[in-house]
Image (tube, rainbow, N blue to C red):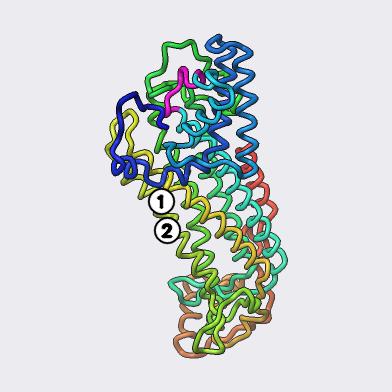
Amino acid sequence: MKLWQKENTSTSQLIETFTVGRDKEFDLLLAPYDVQGSIAHVTMLGEVGLMEKDEAEKAVEALQQIAAEIEEGGFKIDENVEDVHSQVELLLTQRVGDIGKKIHSGRSRNDQVAVDIKLYLRAEVKAVKDEVAELFDLLLQQSEKYKNVLLPGYTHLQIAMPSSFGLWFGAYAESFVDDLEMLAAAYRITNKNPLGSGAGYGSSFPLNRRRTTELLNFASLNHNSVYAQMTRGKTEKAVAMGLSCIAATLSKLAMDCCLYMNQNFGFITFPSELTTGSSIMPHKKNPDVFELIRAKCNRIQSTPNELTLLLNNLPSGYHRDLQLTKEILFPAIEELKACLQLCRLMLTNIQVKESILLDQKYKYLFTVEAVNDLVNRGIPFREAYKQIGDDVEGGNFAFDVTKPLAHTHEGSISNLCNKEISEEMQKVLAQFD
């Protein structure tokens, strides 16, 4: 069954297989949202007189039954049915007869799939947001727990200045705040209703688009019908940009963990059951989880670029190219959620090493502390810098590493500002309500 098929016409099986591609696979993810959009559309049709009131009520009741079957896992797209939209309309027609044939009035598959994707992405963006929020909370908990455990800080992968696990965990927590700002922007773009734009040029029917916007809980609608269709692909790319920011933070965190687990660093360890071994080397505890998080998140960061290459130079209006956005973006969403969940599992079970900086190889981490001590005694900074530099070059540098570090400004070792970071996160999370 094809919504566009006419009598005495047929399509080559080869052409049909090629054009459908993997669409049915991803359409199953859209099924609950397709029914949700149809319920709103039918309700509106009944209210504006394009369906009889009792017809609309019967159609809505049958659609709600289909929605329940989808939720229970009993829904499938038949082999001879083209897509989820066709399957839903077929089921509805089988149950309520000719009433089911009326529900497409004032609607095209173009705006139908557009609203399905927006409803799906809106829900998935909120699911990703929730995963990030849980990891954020864990990072701040670990930051507070280990705030007094010092850690070498690096620039150019050379030892630089003292840091702490409190700073390290907190840095990634705050990074996720900015990442969710990007995702919140994508959420706002997604949370607009394209339904009623038809094939992209509106309809001569007296549709009430504000009513379907209300019924579907969209914050607003895409007002211009041509632009409503132009949001196909653009919405997906906006979401992909938000996901890529989260993935970038996660990838960097995973890389840090791979380094810090290395025996030459030895800053952190994990229980054996969270690492993997070697087929030949009995001593190995490999950071495979973090390596795969790093790799998967690097791939996710390529998603906006892949969508750009797909969408670039398309004129206005619908094009079949847009079908492929699903197979680019939908798996990336699932991958990112899995990476966030696994990262949370790992960091819940992290074990940090105490007294790292007592090792003599880290003594030069304290050169800036020594310079600052001289400055506090009245020596100009440039002279203090030269004096300590000469001590280092001459092999005479020494510093009491057991001396408490006086780092008190906002965002330093002794003043992590975790409360303020948490407050910033709450402001961002409120944007998803």
* Three-letter amino acid code of the residue under disc 2: Arg
Disc 1 crowd rating (10 Å Cα; few below 14, some 14-19, many 20+) is many
Image quadrant where one finds the C terminus: top right
Q: Which residue is mark 1?
A: 303
Q: Which secondary structure, mark 2?
A: helix
Tell me what residue is drawn at x 46 percent, y 84 percent: 390
Tell me what residue is drawn at x 50 percent, y 29 percent: 90
Of the numbered discs in the image, which one, if any, rests on residue 299?
A: 2
* Three-letter amino acid code of the residue under disc 1: Thr
380 versus 22 height, above or below: below
213 versus 254 height, above or below: above
215 versus 250 height, above or below: above
Work out whether residue 177 or residue 190 is closer to the camera in this orientation and state it: 190
Residue 231 lies, in percent from the top left, at 41, 32
Tell me what residue is drawn at x 31 percent, y 29 percent: 316
Residue 415 lies, in percent from the top left, at 67, 61
Q: Which quadrant of the structure image shows residue 141? A: bottom right
Q: Is residue 164 visible?
A: yes
The span shown in magenta is 102-111
Image quadrant where one finds the N terminus: top left
Distance from disc 1 to disc 2, alpha carbons, whole Å, reads 7 Å
193 versus 254 height, above or below: above
- Magenta-span inclusion, residue 65: no
